[in-house]
Amino acid sequence: MDRRKFLRNSSLAGAILSTSIPSGLQNFKDEFDLNEVTIDELQQKMKEGKLNAAGITQKYLQRIKTVDQQGPSLHAVIEINPDALSIAASLDRERKQGKIRGPLHGIPFLIKDNISTADKMMTTAGSLALLGNIMLEEAFIIKKLREAGAVIMGKTNLSEWANFRSSRSTSGWSSRGGQTRCPYVLDRNPSGSSSGSGAATAANLCAISIGTETDGSIVSPSSVNGLVGIKPTVGLWSRTGIIPISATQDTAGPIARTVRDAAILLGPLAGPDSTDPVTLHPTTQLPVDYAQFLDPHGIQGKTIGIESAHLKGHEGVVALYNAAIEILKKSGATVVEIDLLKKLNEIGSINQSEFLVLQYEFKDGLNKYLAGSQSKVRTLAEIIAFNKSHEAAVMPYFKQETLIDSDAKGGLQSEEYKDTLAKTLLSRTIIENLMLEHHLDAISGVTNGPACCIDLVAGDYDTGFSFSTPAAIAGFPHITVPMGQINELPIGLSFMGRPYTEPQLLSIAYAYEQATHLRRPPAFMQRIPT
């Protein structure tokens, strides 16, 4: 969850992480031979016999040692799968026997540490309270990922409890994994809560990763780390086996370096799950292959709404946004200025309403998850008590008031919860009506402002732009793609649409990506150059 959207006091900027950047970093040379490699390129190398899955996995594991644990010391990976190489070797044997499961066969992945795996790795949401939680049942999407032939190399660090612990938290910090750094500028925040997935993918620690989002936690770290992120329609991917915040808003999704890689992952993990009812009612037949919709001319003839609130603010970000709008026009789109954010706030303080809904749903969902876990703590109340009794290790920088306030909420039959949920769900009607009124195929905005400094004293601060909330509270699909950089810090461009319109959004995002090619690999700079 990207907590910065709840913040409006940018005067907190300035206090930077006190932990020193490793000395000698200025001599770090990034000569990794798989830098920026795509899934298609890896498959071609395996087909030609130049590499195999075990060799590729070994290269990435060494990359993690060189970049994540040493050198820049990103701290993006929280745990390595001890069986990664044996899994890769078994997939190589299948390939030799002529069995290739699909485009993900032998491709190394990292997944966020709130997604359950039935293997030797723990699932902890970054919390020391959940150490030792090795699940007997794995998440539905992990089962499908294994069936598709992927190699799960390890798990990524995250903002503890998916950034739902404190109003003063720092994105990318967890009591188990420490502080993850932005690979572009190391004293900067990689954004939350899929911080490790974003930093790892940007730094080429894996071929592709999986994050989760309640509001902003896929698209925000993707934007800040120069990546493509897809927050699917809620219901496209199952949430079973994922440590929850919100039954209304939660979803997992791809974090990749290209639109095509993200599209390749989207299909194999989609589909109905009898234990997650929201997946059982898609409005249309789900495609098996989303890469088929990628069209370099996908913007031609489309009508795209442009969020007018993002036409003012930081001059560098606005300049990138205006340049992106001109590219949309030159690519054949009709552009219409709209004021979606203003319309959403007219139904009340949408952020406050959303947060209240999340507190109720977090307590309910987490207690149900913990009851079926292998954790020693089995309720939210027990987590709060554990944190208090281990305060020095768990809460050295910020506390747990969000956990405490959530535990004080009643059940989902509460009138306060039902009334507030109804208010937030009005967003669906507002967005649908706005799109119908202007005949829009998609709505676009600035995904996020530039990465803020890591600040363990005051926490995250607002950098002026955020476009995650509309799609998040409505449960609609949202894709971000690189739009450029401000002082070496990436900025993303968002496209959102109606439920299950991922094919159309992917086509638009791909066409924009092909017209611009604005992704740049990170330089692991110690700080903004002066």
Image (spheres, helix red, strand yellow):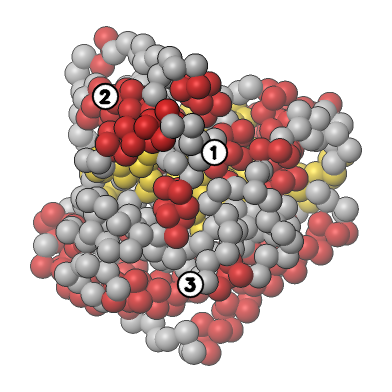
Residue 25, given in percent of the width and then of the height, sits at 26, 16
Q: Look at label 1 and name its amino acid.
A: Gly
Mark 2, Cα crowd under 10 Å, few <14 / some 14-19 / many 20+, is: some
Q: Look at label 3 and name its amino acid.
A: Thr
Residue 14, given in percent of the width and then of the height, sits at 35, 37
Disc 3 element: loop
Q: Look at label 2 and name its amino acid.
A: Gln
Work out whether residue 175 or residue 346 is closer to the camera in this orientation and state it.
Answer: 175
Above or below residue 131? Residue 262 is: above
Q: Is residue 259 visible?
A: yes
Residue drawn 22% across and 51% down? 120
Disc 1 element: loop
Q: CA distance from mark 3 to mark 2?
A: 38 Å
Above or below residue 28? Residue 294 is: below
Q: Residue furthest front?
A: 97
Mark 1, Cα crowd under 10 Å, few <14 / some 14-19 / many 20+, is: some
Residue drawn 30% across and 73% down? 372
Task: Check contact, mark 3 vs mark 2: CB within 8 A.
Answer: no
Q: Which mark is drawn over residue 200?
A: none
Residue where numbered disc 2 is placed: 62
Sequence order check, earlier mark of 1 and 3:
1
Residue where numbered disc 3 is placed: 275
Mark 3, Cα crowd under 10 Å, few <14 / some 14-19 / many 20+, is: few
Q: Which quadrant would the N terminus be assigned to in this image?
A: bottom left
Above or below residue 52? Residue 438 is: below
Residue where numbered disc 1 is placed: 102
Q: CA distance from mark 1 to mark 3?
A: 26 Å
Q: Which quadrant would the C terminus be assigned to in this image?
A: top left
Disc 2 element: helix
Residue drawn 23% across and 59% down? 134
Residue 381, given in percent of the width and then of the height, sits at 24, 77
Foreground tag (2 vs 1): 1
